[in-house]
Amino acid sequence: MTRQRYFLITMLALATLAIAEEADKADDETVEAIDEITVMGVRDLGVLRAEMVRAEDEVYELYNALNDDDDYDIICKKEARIGSQIKFRVCQARLFRDAQSEAAEEEEGFLNPTRPLVVEEKHNRILKEKMRVIANENPELIMALRKRYALEQKFEEERNRKFGEH
């Protein structure tokens, strides 16, 4: 009997170990399955806006890398309007920023609003054409633009859902 008892205890121990291993595997599979769960829900407007900004940065980074004229590279900065402390994101071609800077220097620190507009009108068509040509030649940029547009649509839908039509 002692041998049988020893044999049964050993078998029971091995069975317990096998069950524990199976439970660990099941737990691992459960953890893996949990990792794959996708929660679909409404995202916060701040999160959506941050995603839009990242997507926009990706678009401009791609465009700037593909663009052969640094004057038409797009630069984004946070700026406050004259007389305000509230900063907002402004994305402009380098030559527009340079024109505003030069106009401000010429006016001894006061921005001459007409000079940058003249430069902007002159170069805006060139910028749009450069962007169109580069996008048409580069599927990666088109995909980035589509992603940015889709995020903007989601943001607008969520804003309208929360606050009504604007």
Image (spheres, rainbow, N blue to C red):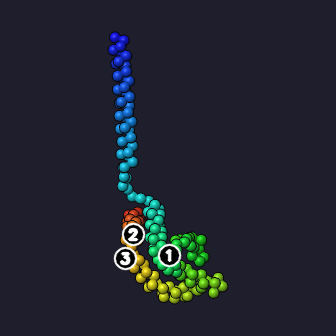
Look at discs 1 and 2 and give the one toward the viewer. 2
Name the residue: 66% across, 85% down.
Answer: 108
Name the residue: 46% across, 60% down.
Answer: 47
Report the Cα–Cα distance between label 3 and label 2.
10 Å
- Location of the C terminus (image quadrant): bottom left
Along the line of sight, which residue is nearer the eye, 108 or 119? 119
**Disc 2 marks which amino acid?**
Glu
Q: Is residue 13 visible?
A: yes
As displayed, is residue 114 above or below residue 27?
Answer: below
Q: Categorize mark 2 by other alpha carbons within 10 Å: few (<14), some (14-19), many (20+).
A: some
Along the line of sight, which residue is nearer the eye, 103 or 160? 103
How far from the left and from the top, in percent, is residue 7? 35, 18
How far from the left and from the top, in percent, is residue 131? 42, 78
- List the residue tagged with mark 2: 140
- List the residue tagged with mark 1: 74
Secondary structure found at label 3: helix
Report the Cα–Cα distance between label 1 and label 2.
17 Å
Q: Is residue 45 visible?
A: no
Q: Are marks 3 and 1 in contact (CB under 8 Å)?
A: no
Q: Give the number of the disc on residue 136.
A: 3
* Residue at the top extreme, as displayed: 1
Secondary structure found at label 2: helix
